[in-house]
Image (spheres, helix red, strand yellow):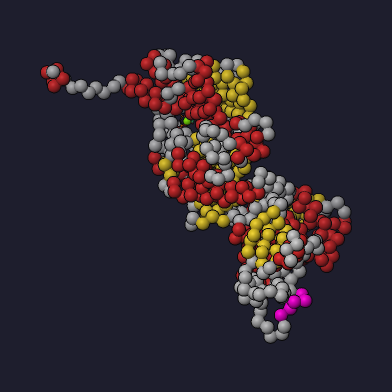
Amino acid sequence: MMDTLTKSRIQILPPEEARKIAAGEVVNRPAALVREFIDNALDAGSTLIELVIDEGGIRRTEVIDNGGGMTREDLELCWYTHATSKIRSLEDLNTAETLGFRGEALAAAAAVARLEILTSTGGREAWQLEVGPGNTTPPRITQTRRAKGTNVRALGLFDTIPARKRFLKREGSEANLCRQAFIDKALAFYGISFRFIQDGKLKLFLPAVNSRKERFAQALLTGTEGLFLYEITLGGTGFSVAVVAGGPELYRNDRRQQYVFANGRRIQDFSLLQALEYGLQGWFPNGTHPIGGIYVSIDPALADFNIHPAKQEARFVDAGAIHHAVTQGLRDFSRHRNMAGTEKFSDGENKLWDGFAEGKETVYQDQEGKNEAAGSSQAAALALEALLENPRSFAPLPGRNPREGDPEPPLFAGESTPPYGDLGVDGGSAPRLAGRVFDLFLLVEWKDRLFIIDQHAAHERLLFNRFMAEAIPKQELLVPLSFTTESEEDDRFLSHRREDLAKLGIIITEGEEGLWYIEALPANWRLGDAETVKEILKLKTAGEDMAERWAATLSCHGAIKDGDYLDDTTALALAKAALKFPEPRCPHGRPIWTELSREELFRAVRRL
Ligand code: ADP
Ligand code: MG
């Protein structure tokens, strides 16, 4: 008793003991080494990352990369506590794009295991560091051989700290956790190749792919399951979210295949997992759960990743906005899928324009809580807007012209006088979107008639009219596209019609003999170089009709395709615009819609 009063009970731990304890928080099991080492490899700009574990990672956890490597000087410092090349002060966290920033992973690894690093920045020199566990042996640096990149290996985890080793699970379980940590990183970085080798056997090989959706399928699904995955992009202020979601074909009875990532780190975020479930509610059988990933990219200033020792949680300045964007975007999307059954969006083989023509990827934009299937579908939105705001640029209906002195017809029928001719029925009702069928047609009920409108043709016509009526917006190329003509005829065409081409948004300049440069193209142009040149040279045969031909080319590539989904507002606006066309044909001459009267339908079922 006396003793405790006179003698202080508080003791400052010797630095070495303190470090072991702190290190245990960062590195509590092999999977933590996996995560930290892979993060470092990613930060080093690697394109190929290999994870090797032996005996659940306890005996060995090694990550091999082909990134930038370290110089001898950096190698000497890298394993010290708070040694980092990534930030210089706390403020830097507001802009840090790297996965690491605390400079404690290698230090922790060296405190609790034997740490060996082989590294080279390319060229002749390569160095090897051996240090730890703890201060059992002095650090040693020797020369070695290695191509550019780094191996980081931790050997004998917790061999000198039995109290911690006791808390490790069986080897098999630790191996599974390592595999999961590996998959978490691979899911977030689909453009990088990953290999996983366990006890000498290659278990997973994930070559780089082009989308999160592909990586998700590659890493987690089997057979053709990937066909039922969708990728959706959502946006908001200071953040964007990609969602990969499986359709109901891939439902699960638990939530194990649900992932949330923020700036490349998997995080635990219950509310965003909820958003995935809410957003897809109604599309899935009761009691089942979707699979999917939510990938948040956020301005580092709007998030705090420094609240969890292993960075497994993040705090967002405006978590509500992200939650809302995900729920709303998915709701919109699944409502559509629900109606359309399981058919896929069209492949959108024409990548000329952003947005709808892109096919599988649907883009929603969050605007003050109001979601619209807008996003990069600017072509569509702008076209509709142009039509809505500028009806005069569209000639009156042929054969149904208002008489001299009649007031200008309003844009939409039903609002007062229907511009679509006299149907012999009472005016006053506005067109109503009755539905969609066959992934192509919009059904519109209007004044005792059913209009079945081909959405592609309607949109194509709308765009065509605009391209004919207004200057085609152009965009300068960062790097001019150079090409060589094959005939003098081509040269003649290009030089004679250069000014006409400029009016079409195509700016070309002449180089040496037969060499030409395309300096600008219509905004949102998406075709590859060869196709672009081909499309331009095709105009050779157009003569006087060049503008029309070009408008047809642009509108065909720019129009939504069958299978593309328009939200109700846009669909109705498009339908109304289509019903107002003076010439209800697409630029190729096909009719845009067909119609049935109430009477015809009644007669068909012998009701009259
Ligand atoms: P942090 O990642 O927070 O900076 P670490 O302890 O994980 O801290 O790494 C310390 C430093 O070592 C890094 O900042 C980086 O400069 C260097 N480093 C670690 N791993 C690698 C690697 N695989 N390739 C190149 N440099 C590395
Ligand atoms: Mg690190």
Above or below: residue 273 compared with residue 386? above
Please give the name of the residue rendered at 54% of the width and 33% of the height, measured from the top-left corner.
Answer: 253
Please give the name of the residue rendered at 71% of the width and 46% of the height, measured from the top-left corner.
Answer: 347
Above or below: residue 432 compared with residue 121? below
- Viewer-side residue, 328 vs 337: 337
Q: Is residue 339 magenta?
A: no
Please give the name of the residue rendered at 62% of the width and 76% of the height, measured from the top-left corner.
Answer: 416
**Residue positioned most to the left:** 2
Above or below: residue 471 compared with residue 117? below
In screen coordinates, is 394 left or right of 265?
right
Residue 327 x/y as whole percent:
51, 47
- Viewer-side residue, 17 vs 228: 228
- Viewer-side residue, 375 vs 426: 426
Q: Is residue 552 visible?
A: yes
Residue 545 x/y as whole percent:
82, 66
Occupied quadrant, residue 221: top right
Please give the name of the residue rendered at 65% of the width and 82% of the height, measured from the top-left corner.
Answer: 407
